[in-house]
């Protein structure tokens, strides 16, 4: 598939396209129309909230992602059954629902509450998550490469933003080559690591919600069986990439009980994580000048092997 092609009947994954999917799913479910619907996040999925309905609507990019969406729902239900502080799916509504070529799921809305969750909350939640037994349903082995390669295949048309930072063929070739260079070693690590278990897969503070006195760990799309150190990477890389204070990272390590940067495989793990972060951002380049600018920053640092260059969260 060329970068400018989309599957038949599919529109680009934009806010308006995801909104159409939500409204179609709501009609199919016979649920009330969410007059206060507003976008929370647009990335691998789109998240919308309707505080009046007490719902969050999660839109997967394609209705071919049924296995992944079913896994998200199964994980949420299992975590709640374990007494783990996760987010509740709204199972009074049949789900997932196909809509406009996407898949829509329905989740409990948790209103923003101060104080914001802290790194200490993340460390404690990961420690408890990693202590849980294996789930009673199958989980895939941790493997971020298929989704990264799919992003490269379906990347947007160069120049769509009118920005010099738009995706180029050289960008895609570099990222594909970086995947080729690291994939076999990463899979060998996953196969041989002695500390394999349940991992969240995308464990950062953006996936925490405060619900009264509790903090919830949300977003189960990347849940898998893999090296538990994978869940520590977002915090470790935040020191160099996003300006996290080293003292805050030290506290995180003390609370969790391990420091991933001390592993001899850390550079490999970090490289794969940063490729994932960059290809994730790449999906929004055709629709966002800010994403295009940040994509250019990340590509330059990856090409130059600059592990201390500052990135910016979007």
Image (cartoon, helix red, strand yellow):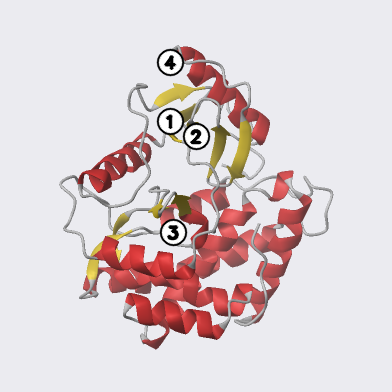
Label of residue 106 in the image? 1
Identify the disc placed on residue 29.
Answer: 4
Question: In the rendered structure, which disc, 2 or 1, sits on the residue that comes first in sequence?
Answer: 2
Count residues near mark 4 (Cα–Cα under 10 Å), then give few for <14, some for 14-19, many for 20+.
few
Q: Which of marks 4 and 3 is nearer the N terminus?
A: 4
Q: How far apart are marks 4 and 3 (CA)?
A: 30 Å
Mark 4 and mark 1 in contact (Cβ < 8 Å)? yes
Q: What element carries label 1?
A: strand
Q: Report helix, strand or loop for mark 2.
A: strand
Pointers 2 and 1 in contact (C-beta within 8 Å): yes
Residue 282 location, quadrant: bottom right
Quarter holding the N terminus is top right
* Residue identifier under label 2: 56
Q: Which of marks 4 and 2 is in front?
A: 2
Mark sitting earlier along the chain (4/2): 4
**Residue ID for mark 3:** 202
Q: Which of marks 3 and 1 is in front?
A: 1
Q: Dot 1: within a 10 Å radius of its alpha carbon, few (fewer than 14), some, or many (20 or more) residues?
A: many
Residue lying at 27% horizontally and 40% vertically, measured from the top left: 77
Among numbered discs 3 and 1, the one appearing first in the sequence: 1
Other residues around mark 3 within 10 Å, as few (<14) / some (14–19) / many (≥20): many
- Give me the C-alpha separation between circle 2 and circle 1: 6 Å
Q: Where is residue 242 in the image (x, y as percent from the top left)?
A: 62, 72
The residue tagged with tag 4: helix, strand or loop? helix
Looking at the image, residue 100 lies above or below residue 248: above
């Amino acid at each position: 598939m060329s970068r400018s092609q989309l599957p038949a009947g599919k529109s680009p994954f934009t806010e308006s396209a995801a909104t159409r999917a939500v409204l179609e799913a709501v009609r199919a479910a016979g649920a009330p129309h969410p007059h206060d619907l507003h976008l929370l996040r647009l990335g691998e999925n789109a998240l919308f909230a309707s505080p009046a309905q007490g719902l969050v609507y999660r839109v997967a990019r394609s209705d071919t992602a049924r296995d992944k969406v079913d896994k998200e729902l199964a994980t949420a239900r299992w975590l709640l059954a374990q007494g783990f502080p996760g987010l509740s799916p709204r199972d009074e509504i049949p789900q997932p629902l196909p809509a406009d070529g996407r898949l829509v799921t329905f989740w409990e809305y948790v209103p923003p509450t101060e104080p914001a969750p802290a790194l200490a909350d993340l460390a404690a939640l990961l420690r408890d998550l990693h202590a849980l037994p294996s789930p009673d349903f199958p989980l895939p082995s941790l493997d971020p490469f298929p989704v990264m390669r799919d992003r490269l295949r379906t990347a947007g048309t160069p120049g769509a933003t009118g920005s010099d930072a738009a995706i180029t063929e050289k960008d895609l070739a570099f990222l594909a080559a970086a995947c080729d260079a690291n994939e076999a070693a990463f899979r060998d690590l996953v196969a041989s690591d002695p500390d394999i278990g349940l991992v969240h897969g995308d464990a950062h503070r953006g996936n925490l919600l405060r619900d009264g006195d509790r903090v919830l760990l949300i977003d189960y799309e990347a849940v898998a069986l893999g090296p538990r150190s994978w869940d520590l990477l977002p915090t470790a890389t935040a020191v160099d990439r996003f300006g996290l204070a080293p003292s805050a990272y030290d506290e995180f390590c003390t609370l969790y009980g391990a420091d991933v940067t001390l592993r001899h495989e850390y550079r490999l793990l970090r490289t794969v994580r940063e490729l994932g972060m960059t290809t994730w951002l790449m999906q929004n380049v055709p629709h966002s000048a800010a994403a295009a600018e940040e994509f250019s920053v990340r590509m330059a640092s990856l090409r130059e092997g600059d592990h201390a260059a500052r990135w910016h969260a979007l």
